[in-house]
Image (cartoon, grey):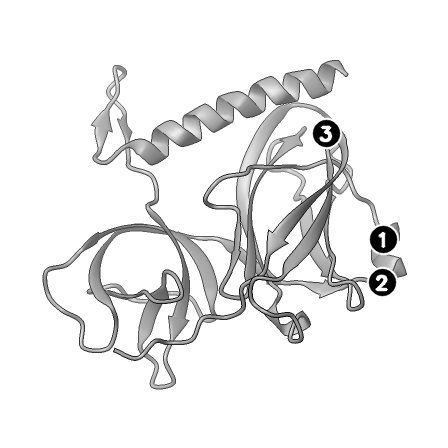
């Protein structure tokens, strides 16, 4: 119980730091001489057209053309983005933008839920209920926090499975033996789920299951399938 209480306190501190970072609109100098850079103002999917042109899908109706930005990714990924609008109009997309910074989100495919998945190691994970945690464009993106005991020496595994019959979503966190309670860490991960939910309509509620520090938890998630490139 003490560990859970300590985690909640640490999680609250992380939440305050995250909120402060995301509220900054310009580079700010701290008392110790270091700089804090502004947080993201968008969560996007980095896509390419059939002709190979890169763009960012912001929402169902908005696409962004990154001016002068070269795509380093060999596949489609989700990303946190800080951008400003460019005065120049885009010929193909909704807006042309300047990329101030971009950080890709760990993006992986969801898997099919089966008995074997349910038997795998599954330890606690906390989920933030904020603007980053969302289901859109055929992805479930989660802002999470976990305990790490040995720094970055042991890699944790986070997976998501979809039940074909019920369409329930099962989040699994395997700490791979990192059982120490050293410090809290937060991250963002995205799961591509549209391929496993082809018969689910936009707006339909799905149930997400995970193991929280308070016990087993569920939450309703509204599903929105892949956004198409809107016509200008």
Give the image location of residue 227, x and y in percent.
45, 70
- Taking the spot 77% from the left edge, 38% from the top edge, the residue there is 123
Give the image location of residue 214, x and y in percent.
74, 28
Label at residue 114: 2
- Taking the spot 69% from the left edge, 56% from the top edge, the residue there is 160
Give the image location of residue 185, x and y in percent.
57, 32
Circle 1/circle 3 CB separation < 8 Å: no
Q: Earlier in the sequence, mark 1 or mark 3?
A: 1
Is the N terminus in the top left, top right, bottom left or bottom right quadrant?
A: top right
Q: Which residue lies furthest to the left in this view?
A: 87
Q: Earlier in the sequence, mark 3 or mark 2?
A: 2
- Name the element at disc 1: helix
Is the C terminus in the top left, top right, bottom left or bottom right quadrant?
A: bottom left
Residue 81 sits above or below residue 139 on the image: above
Circle 1/circle 2 CB separation < 8 Å: yes
User: How many residues crowd around disc 3 within 10 Å: few (fewer than 14), some, or many (20 or more)?
Assistant: some
Give the image location of residue 64, x and y in percent.
28, 64
Which residue is at the front of the view, 9 or 67? 9
| Residue labelled with disc 1 | 118
Q: Measure the C-alpha gap from mark 1 to mark 2.
A: 7 Å
Label at residue 213: 3
User: How many residues crowd around disc 2 within 10 Å: few (fewer than 14), some, or many (20 or more)?
Assistant: few
Left or right of 45 in this view: 147: right
Circle 3/circle 2 CB separation < 8 Å: no
């Amino acid at each position: 119980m003490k560990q859970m209480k300590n985690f909640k306190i640490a999680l609250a501190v992380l939440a305050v730091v995250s909120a402060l970072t995301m509220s900054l609109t310009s580079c700010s100098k701290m008392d110790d001489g270091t700089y804090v850079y502004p947080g993201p103002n968008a969560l996007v999917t980095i896509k390419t057209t059939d002709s190979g042109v890169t763009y960012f899908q912001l929402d169902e109706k908005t696409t962004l053309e990154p001016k002068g930005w070269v795509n380093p990714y060999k596949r489609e990924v989700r990303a946190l983005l800080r951008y400003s609008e460019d005065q120049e109009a885009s010929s193909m997309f909704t807006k042309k933008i300047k990329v101030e910074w971009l950080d890709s989100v760990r993006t992986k495919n969801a898997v099919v839920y089966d008995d074997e998945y349910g038997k795998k190691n599954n330890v606690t994970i906390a989920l933030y209920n904020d603007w980053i945690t969302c289901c859109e464009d055929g992805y479930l993106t989660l802002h999470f926090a976990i305990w790490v005991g040995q720094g970055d020496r042991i890699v944790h595994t986070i997976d998501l499975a979809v039940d074909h019959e019920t369409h329930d979503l099962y989040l699994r966190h395997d700490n791979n033996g990192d059982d120490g309670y050293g410090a809290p860490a937060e991250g963002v991960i995205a799961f591509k789920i549209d391929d496993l939910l082809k018969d689910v309509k936009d707006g339909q509620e799905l149930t997400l299951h995970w193991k929280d520090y308070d016990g087993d938890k569920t939450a309703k998630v509204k599903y929105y399938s892949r956004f198409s490139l809107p016509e200008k």
